[in-house]
């Protein structure tokens, strides 16, 4: 008579158990050392070996050779246990016998001694299905059973079992069986059955079993019949309704090459399958790529792909169309290849920092001063390239450059830019000096004074570093002339628009150093010392700098100019 593979190859000894070495070792040592409990609880995933372990343990308790971890499988007790007809081994399905009357009948059986064996053993499967009253009725007997009674409880959901039951049993947790062990066991069985196979097909079956050996063996039984005794990938994928790995390989290659036609062909092919299944298989395939020897995808790209797939699963939960979700997924994966990672940006910035110029000012120290214990330095980052004096001298239209300055002020502070544009008119730029006219009233002057640090910094970036700014007195009637000039400039800008480069459109540092120049139109009457533009060599004469030098006794002070 033909038997299912799961029954035909059911383990008969502890050493035959697959993936549960810790449990089989513990029970074997308990049998050999005669340290036995009266009640055991086996919990774990379906098909992980709970019932098989309970039967092996019961057979080991009743073997005529004594309580041993290696039953002989030859004596009458072992043979009857293997054939599931031993009178002293009572198996009860708690899913169908879950009431208090069934438990009362079981308790009544515990009063009678075993007929032929050493113990009377009760195996209660799916014990979590018992009613609350049945659990309560079992408590006292489970806590103090007769010396010849052993209880073995099995369940797939231990959280539904009352704590009072858990506290009266030794709890063994069966873990999920690894795919590699399932694959090896399937391979071993097919070799015994003399059936040809492809290893890739067995890997798919082991993965589909999801840690359950019984589920994997059931799928293998079905595959042997469907494939006519040759288990191959094509047969397994058709039987399970999943997509072949070769199609996924071609899809990843098309995404990396941004081959839109091939991606559309895959979407057409995928219409025959479930969208969620394709996303799951794609996730598993990408995971395999991460551990493969040839690194086709970097970990960063793999992480982006997984984020895209996770977002697509959320769209499916909202009831979105499967074909649309797949299309969106694949094109988002192609788009994610264009994103630059932060490490690359940091490296590029570091390269730019190494090219920044620095200025060193030696410090003359007296013979009595000691060697330096510290170096005082100021660092700065220049993010927008400036126009050098030579480049500025070769520029014929300084008026457009001044308009760029106005636009950058607008970008930094719109109110300041509006005030500056309304009250200031470009005159000329020569010999490193920027000349303009200003018609600012008292209110405008206050605003321009507060933002002069920003204006001066941006002017240095546009016209060149260390430029001077001169304000020319405005003559009566110039305001109307400025308005006419602005209108003409706007007309010229429309007719001769030149796109600004990315670097010209970038803004400066967010740290705004307020510099007030005494020669500027923004503050012609200012007498505040902070309003003066400092020369780098004169900084050593500042009182606070002198105090810092006296405190640290440096042999050299290096001043790096901040643009």
Image: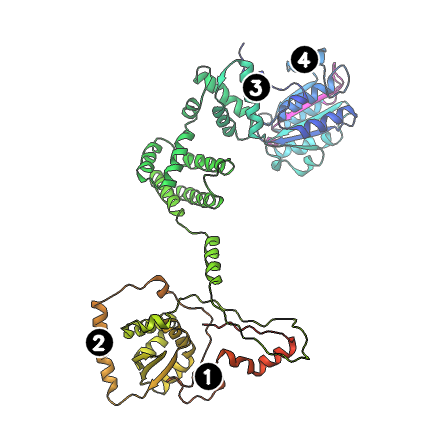
- The residue pinned by badge 1 equals 531
- Earlier-in-chain disc, 4 versus 1: 4
Asked if labels 2 and 3 touch by Cβ distance under 8 angstroms, the answer is no
- The residue pinned by badge 2 equals 487
- Earlier-in-chain disc, 1 versus 3: 3
Secondary structure, mark 4, is helix
- Confirm whether the magenta stretch covers residue 129: yes
The N terminus, quarter of image? top right
Which residue: 48% across, 62% down? 353
x and y percent of residue 368 in the render? 68, 80
Q: Quadrant of residue 237?
A: top left
CA distance separating discs 4 and 1: 104 Å
Observer-nearest of 379 and 537: 537
- Earlier-in-chain disc, 3 versus 2: 3
- Earlier-in-chain disc, 3 versus 4: 4
CA distance separating discs 3 and 2: 89 Å
Report the span colored magenta: 110-130
Q: Quadrant of residue 234?
A: top left
x and y percent of residue 213 in the render? 56, 25
CA distance separating discs 1 and 3: 88 Å
Residue furthest front as drawn: 367
Residue 545 shows in this picture: yes
- The residue pinned by badge 4 equals 80
Residue 105 shows in this picture: no
CA distance separating discs 2 and 1: 34 Å
- The residue pinned by badge 3 equals 188
Relative to 257, residue 423 above or below: below
Mark 1 Cα shell of 10 Å, populated few (<14), some (14-19), many (≥20): some
CA distance separating discs 4 and 2: 108 Å
- Earlier-in-chain disc, 4 versus 2: 4
Secondary structure, mark 1, is helix
Asked if labels 1 and 2 touch by Cβ distance under 8 angstroms, the answer is no
């Amino acid at each position: 008579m033909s038997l299912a593979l799961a029954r035909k190859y059911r383990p008969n000894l502890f050493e035959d158990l697959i993936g549960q070495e810790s449990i089989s070792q513990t029970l074997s040592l308990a049998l050999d050392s005669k340290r036995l409990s009266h009640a055991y609880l086996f919990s774990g995933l379906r098909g992980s070996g709970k019932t098989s372990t309970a039967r092996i343990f019961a057979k080991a308790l009743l073997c005529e050779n004594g309580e041993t971890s290696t039953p002989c499988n030859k004596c009458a007790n072992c043979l009857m246990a293997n054939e599931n007809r031993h009178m002293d081994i009572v198996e009860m399905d708690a899913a169908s016998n879950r009431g208090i009357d069934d438990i009362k009948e079981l308790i009544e059986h515990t009063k009678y001694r075993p007929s032929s064996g050493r113990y009377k053993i009760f195996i209660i499967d799916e014990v979590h299905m018992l009613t609350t009253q049945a659990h309560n009725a079992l408590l006292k007997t489970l806590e103090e059973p007769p010396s010849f009674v052993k209880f073995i409880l099995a369940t797939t959901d231990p959280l539904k079992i009352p704590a009072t039951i858990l506290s009266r049993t030794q709890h063994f947790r069966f873990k999920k069986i690894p795919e590699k062990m399932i694959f090896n066991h399937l391979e071993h069985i097919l070799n015994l059955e003399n059936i040809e196979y492809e290893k890739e097909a067995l890997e798919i079956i082991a993965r589909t079993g999801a840690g359950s050996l019984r589920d994997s063996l059931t799928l293998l039984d079905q595959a042997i019949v469907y494939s006519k005794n040759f288990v191959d990938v094509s047969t397994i994928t058709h039987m399970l309704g999943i997509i072949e790995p070769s199609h996924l390989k071609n899809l990843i290659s098309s995404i990396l090459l941004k081959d839109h036609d091939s991606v559309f062909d895959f979407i057409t092919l995928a219409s025959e399958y479930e969208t969620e299944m394709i996303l799951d298989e794609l996730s598993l395939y990408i995971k395999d790529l991460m551990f493969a020897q040839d690194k086709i995808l970097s970990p960063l790209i793999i992480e982006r792909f997984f984020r895209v797939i996770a977002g697509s699963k959320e769209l499916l939960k909202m009831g979105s169309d499967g074909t649309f979700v797949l299309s969106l997924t694949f094109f988002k994966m192609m788009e994610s290849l264009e994103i630059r990672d932060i490490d690359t940006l940091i490296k590029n910035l570091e390269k730019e920092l190494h090219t920044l110029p620095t200025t060193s000012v030696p410090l003359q120290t007296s013979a009595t001063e000691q060697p330096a214990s510290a170096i005082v330095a100021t660092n700065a980052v220049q993010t927008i390239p400036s126009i050098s004096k030579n480049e500025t001298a070769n520029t014929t239209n300084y008026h457009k450059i001044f308009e760029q300055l106005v636009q950058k002020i607008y970008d930094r502070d719109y109110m300041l830019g509006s005030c500056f544009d309304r009250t200031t008119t470009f005159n000329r730029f020569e010999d490193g000096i920027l000349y303009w006219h200003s018609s600012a009233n008292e209110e405008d002057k206050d605003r321009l004074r507060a933002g002069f640090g920003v204006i001066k910094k941006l002017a240095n970036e546009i016209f060149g570093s260390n430029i001077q700014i001169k304000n020319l007195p405005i003559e009566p009637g110039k305001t109307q002339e400025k308005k006419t000039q602005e209108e003409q400039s706007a007309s010229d800008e429309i007719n001769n628009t030149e796109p600004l480069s990315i670097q010209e459109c970038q803004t400066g540092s967010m740290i705004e150093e307020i510099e007030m120049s005494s020669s500027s139109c923004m503050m012609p009457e200012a007498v505040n010392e902070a309003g003066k533009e400092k020369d780098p060599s004169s900084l050593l004469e500042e009182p606070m700098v002198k105090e810092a030098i006296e405190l640290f006794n440096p042999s050299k002070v290096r001043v790096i100019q901040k643009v």
